[in-house]
Image: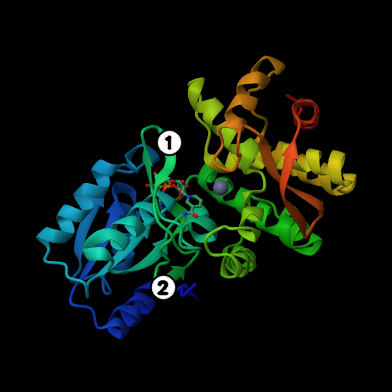
Amino acid sequence: MSQHIIYSNQVDATLSAVIEGGNYHNVAVLVDQNTRQHVLPMLASSLEKAMVIEIPAGDEHKTLNSLISVWEALESCGATRQSLLVNLGGGMVTDLGGLAAATFKRGIACVNVPTTLLGAVDAAVGGKTGINFMGLKNEIGTFAPARHVIISTCFFSTLRHEDILSGYAEMLKHAILNSCHEFTALLDQDLNATDSDHLLERLKASVKLKEDIVNKDPTEQGLRKALNLGHTVGHALESHALETGSPVAHGYAVAWGLVVETVLSHMILGFPSDDLYALASFVKQNYGAPSVTCEHYDRLIALMRHDKKSAAGEINCTLLRQCGEPTINNKIDVDSLQSALDIMRDLLGV
Ligand SMILES: NC(=O)c1ccc[n+]([C@@H]2O[C@H](COP(=O)([O-])OP(=O)(O)OC[C@H]3O[C@@H](n4cnc5c(N)ncnc54)[C@H](O)[C@@H]3O)[C@@H](O)[C@H]2O)c1
Ligand SMILES: [Zn+2]
């Protein structure tokens, strides 16, 4: 996968160098209203001549209509095959902008500048782009890596604490897939007093883990499925929260999903209980617990059967023998899943 990741706290200068080095006909920058307000002014020099394209913020706008508005804006600013699109935002902007760039005139270059922790650690890296369609998340999209991804912690000071936690859950996922050392380093962190240099170091380790996996399996034929850890249960909890009128941030659902799938890993593959308790205690303290009772289990299980990762109605999860040792494509029976949900509720004190 040809994607160049640059870590920089001088993003304006770094982006200027990237733009100059690319010899582009012209440059457009995609923002939402929040990144236009909080982040665009920090890139005044590099993006001085860029045409600004704004879409409304929020995942509910990651739609075909927003995509059309970006294509229209690119047309009207005279973009050519040699133009550059800079995606300046969280995962919503980099997913949609990545798809716009991959499809406009059969593909123009794009650079991702993620402005959320979740974007930096996950969405902006790895080449998946997409929009939601007919009520289905990320239903239409491509694998199309950005030419460069510029990662910095300097944008995070205006994020809500909830958005920091949401990204941190994906870092926990990467860490537990990687090694006990990395996992413990994240659990030791006090999230109410995050030091940005320390966070940048942990972020680099986290992105590297994702890059290593994606480079070996860019189109998710096998190994990349390990990155779905926590997401079979997490997506079901996220969809259920949405259906019941109390939406939760993606990363919260992932944190709870990680606990359930680690319980399953313990039950089925003997994942060490000490690591399970350490994870559950961290999640309880920082993310609380989902609003779920045993009356919701049937609906949650139905949602898991319809997950993209499940074939023929079977429930499919990535599990772990221990930190750093994932196994993909585990079929999970309903009884084990119900027990794991019970144990998660006990551990998180629902
Ligand atoms: N492509 C992938 O591999 C991948 C992986 C994970 C998630 N995703 C996608 O990422 C999206 C979620 O990412 P997200 O949490 O970054 O969402 P987001 O882009 O919607 O950002 C969350 C909120 O923060 C605001 N914001 C962004 N940067 C800011 C800043 N610096 N200061 C203040 N506010 C700021 C946004 O306007 C938005 O309101 C989802 O659409 C998900 O499907 C994609
Ligand atoms: Zn995720």
Q: Residue at x 65, y 19 (%)?
A: 298
Q: Residue at x 44, y 40 (%)?
A: 137
Q: Specify few, some or many for label 2: CA neighbours under 10 Å numbering under 14, 14-19, or 20 or more.
A: many
Disc 2 Cβ-to-ligand 1 distance below 8 Å: no
Q: Is residue 257 left or right of residue 65?
A: right
Of discs 1 and 2, which sits in the foreground?
1
Q: Nearer the viewer, residue 105 or 164?
A: 105
Q: According to the image, label 2 marks what residue? A: 148
The quarter of the picture where residue 145 lies is bottom left
Element under label 1? strand
Percent position of residue 343, x then y:
81, 29
Disc 1 Cβ-to-ligand 1 distance below 8 Å: no
Percent position of residue 235, x then y:
57, 37
Q: Furthest residue to the top?
A: 295
Element under label 2? strand
Which amino acid type corresponds to the residue marked 2 in the rendered image? Answer: His
Q: Furthest residue to the front?
A: 312
Percent position of residue 270, x then y:
89, 46
One can see residue 248 in this view: yes
